[in-house]
């Protein structure tokens, strides 16, 4: 086998209910994830050592990607190699279209795709439940990144069950030049909501998702990290207002931000809203659809 590649989809949180901080420092979550068609790509080839080359779209801040020693891709490779007692050896190329520190779980997606790609390259045939355990060690949203589609996340976000998502949803995604630190946004949430209790239920959102109707979904989108993100980045509030005035059904900060996403009626509506945002707001506006599949290894000889 000369190379294995997999696409790694970005996620958005259609519902992000945040509860009190737990003893381990994480917040209890009740969230609904959807994977969307904005993809990084991870390619691995056999190599006598370990190497990662990162390439990036112009709107992605490549300098913000951690070096090989601190990269979540190296952590993913190390966990898988240790599980099977094999050497950490591969030549990886990570092509990034998902913004870094953007609230779209780009690093988590890369980690999930790396597990899948190396499992194939090294011919390990690791059962999915073992990969999910490694994923949970790598980060709260890596298990969802491995599954793709749409999922209900509880615990700290790492316990995921698939939810029915029969619709075809069209999003405009607006990345920001500078990322936001997820821990900083959660700390700001703690300051703003010092007595958070049980995270808000996702039942209404899950029912709306099952209708396949974008207007129903728009009415139920919810993100408890949006207020803290607005507080840290006031310009995001005006961006949401702008996207909605350009006709989006609803704008929402994605996860801990700062990427904003706009739900539209269909593909041509999303193209129109994206054009409006580019023209009026002078921003990068990408069109993506969900739900998108999780990473699948594609080997070439
Ligand atoms: O799990 P992950 O490494 O992606 O989390 C990054 C950071 O986000 C954590 O260190 C924590 O500060 C915050 N976080 C949290 N509660 C969660 C998930 C993440 O406070 N449920």
Image (spheres, grey):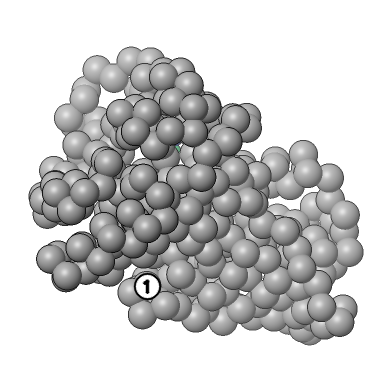
275 with respect to 69 (left or right)? left
Q: x, y (%) of residue 267?
A: 41, 56
In this rendering, does residue 178 appear at all? no
In front: 149, or 214? 214
**Up/down of 220 relative to 81, above or below:** above
143 with respect to 248 (left or right)? right
**Up/down of 250 relative to 118, above or below:** above
Question: In the image, ligand 1 is in what quadrant?
Answer: top left
User: Looking at the rendering, which quadrant does residue 164 occupy?
Assistant: top right
Q: Secondary structure at mark 1?
A: loop
Which residue lies under the disc numbered 1?
60
User: Looking at the rendering, which quadrant does residue 216 occupy?
Assistant: top left
249 with respect to 71 (left or right)? left
In this rendering, does residue 117 appear at all? yes
Q: x, y (%) of residue 99?
A: 39, 64
- Image quadrant holding the C terminus, namely bottom right
**Up/down of 201 relative to 183, above or below:** above
- Image quadrant holding the N terminus, namely bottom right
Q: x, y (%) of residue 206?
A: 48, 25
**Up/down of 229 relative to 110, above or below:** above
Q: Residue at 57% across / 51% down in the picture?
A: 292
């Amino acid at each position: 086998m000369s190379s294995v590649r997999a696409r790694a989809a970005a996620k958005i949180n259609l519902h992000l209910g945040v509860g009190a901080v737990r003893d381990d420092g994480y917040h209890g979550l009740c969230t609904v994830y959807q994977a969307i068609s904005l993809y990084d790509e991870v390619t691995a080839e056999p190599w006598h050592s370990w190497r990662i080359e990162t390439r990036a779209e112009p709107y992605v801040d490549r300098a913000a990607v951690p070096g090989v020693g601190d990269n979540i891709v190296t952590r993913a490779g190390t966990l898988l190699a240790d599980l099977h007692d094999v050497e950490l050896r591969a030549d990886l190329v990570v092509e990034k279209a998902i913004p870094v520190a953007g609230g779209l779980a780009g690093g988590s997606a890369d980690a999930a795709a790396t597990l899948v790609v190396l499992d194939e390259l090294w011919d390990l045939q690791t059962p999915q439940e073992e990969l999910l355990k490694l994923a949970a060690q790598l980060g709260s949203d890596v298990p969802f990144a491995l599954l793709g589609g749409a999922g209900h996340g509880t615990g700290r976000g790492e316990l995921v069950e698939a939810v029915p998502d029969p619709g075809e949803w069209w999003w405009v995604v607006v990345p920001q030049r500078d990322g936001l630190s997820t821990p900083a946004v959660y700390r700001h949430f703690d300051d703003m909501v010092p007595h958070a209790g049980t995270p808000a239920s996702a039942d209404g959102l899950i029912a709306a998702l099952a209708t396949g109707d974008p207007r129903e979904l728009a009415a139920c989108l919810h993100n408890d990290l949006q207020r803290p993100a607005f507080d840290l980045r006031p310009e995001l509030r005006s961006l949401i207002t702008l996207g909605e005035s350009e006709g989006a059904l609803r704008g929402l900060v994605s996860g801990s931000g700062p990427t904003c996403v706009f739900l539209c009626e269909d593909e041509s509506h999303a193209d129109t809203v994206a054009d409006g945002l580019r023209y009026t707001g002078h921003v990068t506006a990408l069109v993506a659809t969900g739900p998108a599949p999780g990473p699948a290894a594609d080997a070439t000889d």
